[in-house]
Image (tube, grey):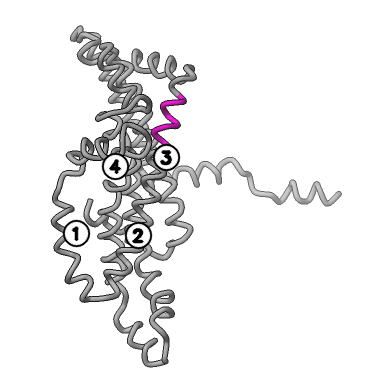
Amino acid sequence: MTDTEVVDTTAPAPGPTATRRRRVDLRERPQLWLVPTVFVVVVLAWEYGTRLLDVDEYVLPRPSQIVEALHRQLTDEQFWGHFWVTTQEALLGFAIGVGAAVLLGTFISQIKVVEATLMPYIVAFQTVPKVALAPLFVLWFGFGLTSKVVMAAVISFFPMLVNVIEGLRAADADRIQMLTVFGASRAQIFRMVRLPSALPFIFAGLDIGIVFAILGAVVGEFIGAKEGLGYLLLQTNYNFDIAGMFAVLVVLSVMGLVAHFVIRLLQRRLAFWAEDTKVIGA
């Protein structure tokens, strides 16, 4: 009997084991089947409900019509130009907003007199609806890319700022005191205690901030733009292409979902020790 025959004889049957593992996963993670089931039920109810009730497509298009409009857009080169413009605006605004929030949040959290001085102004500015600032940004920065980037940066800045401040405050006082006794510098304490403690809060801010950045870019395009998904939404609205509007909304939703999962993946890699943290300031 050869070695190969021995291995084949003693190896366990892979079929039942794999099936048991799949069953365990479905029991422990019911969302694996609940999410697609709910989606299918909603889409079918939407499709056949609009057919039975004879709902006009200008009021609520059927999912099949939305899929046709989405296919038509995805095969159009101009659509991808609009998509890239909005993506560029959102990513640039997000990067600027996050960078400014991390720097300012770190500065505020480390110096009490600065926090006491600036926080009232930050809270007051936070209460201003950011969408209402879009016409001003267009007036100040023009109809080009800059005004949308500024809008995306501003609208993603505050959730990130509050999470950075609260995260740095959440550091364990006993660990800080212990390191201080052993002669650690403020930079060492920040790197070894405050920053790791703040990472879950920072990723929570990133998670909501990237979605807000997409929202800010689209709102800026609503006010004044010649390209972008927000501009495309307005054009489909003017043309009474309601299915096309829903198709653009689907693309925006997918953009937000992809950004969300990328942030969550980075969080699991860089802050794997921490449980999910509730978003602050959202």
SS type, badge 1 = helix
Task: Between residue 281 and residue 33, name the one nearer to us.
Answer: 281
Drawn side of residue 127 relative to residue 280, left or right: left
Nearer-N-terminus badge (1/3): 1
SS type, badge 4 = helix
Badge number at residue 258: 3
- Disc 4 target residue: 151
Nearer-N-terminus badge (2/4): 4
Nearer-N-terminus badge (3/2): 2
Task: Between residue 119 and residue 241, name the one nearer to us.
Answer: 119
Badge number at residue 202: 2
User: Badge 2: few (under 14), some or many (20 or more) residues near its Cα, within 10 Å?
Assistant: many
Badge number at residue 122: 1
Nearer-N-terminus badge (3/4): 4
At x 39%, y 36%, the residue is 255
How much space separates mark 1 and mark 3, taking CA atoms?
A: 30 Å
Task: Between residue 187 and residue 202, name the one nearer to us.
Answer: 187
Residues at circles 2 and 1 in contact by the CB criterion of under 8 Å: no
Q: Position of residue 258 (x, y in %)?
A: 42, 40
**Dominant SS type (magenta):** helix
Instruction: Name the amino acid type tagged 4.
Output: Met
Nearer-N-terminus badge (1/4): 1
Residue 52 inside the magenta-drawn segment: no
Stretch of the chain drawn in magenta: 80-88
User: Badge 3: few (under 14), some or many (20 or more) residues near its Cα, within 10 Å?
Assistant: few
Inspect this view and state whether residue 208 appears: no
At x 17%, y 71%, the residue is 116
SS type, badge 3 = helix
Q: Position of residue 93 (x, y in %)?
A: 36, 45
Residues at circles 3 and 4 in contact by the CB criterion of under 8 Å: no
Residue 81 inside the magenta-drawn segment: yes
Instruction: Name the amino acid type tagged 1.
Output: Ile
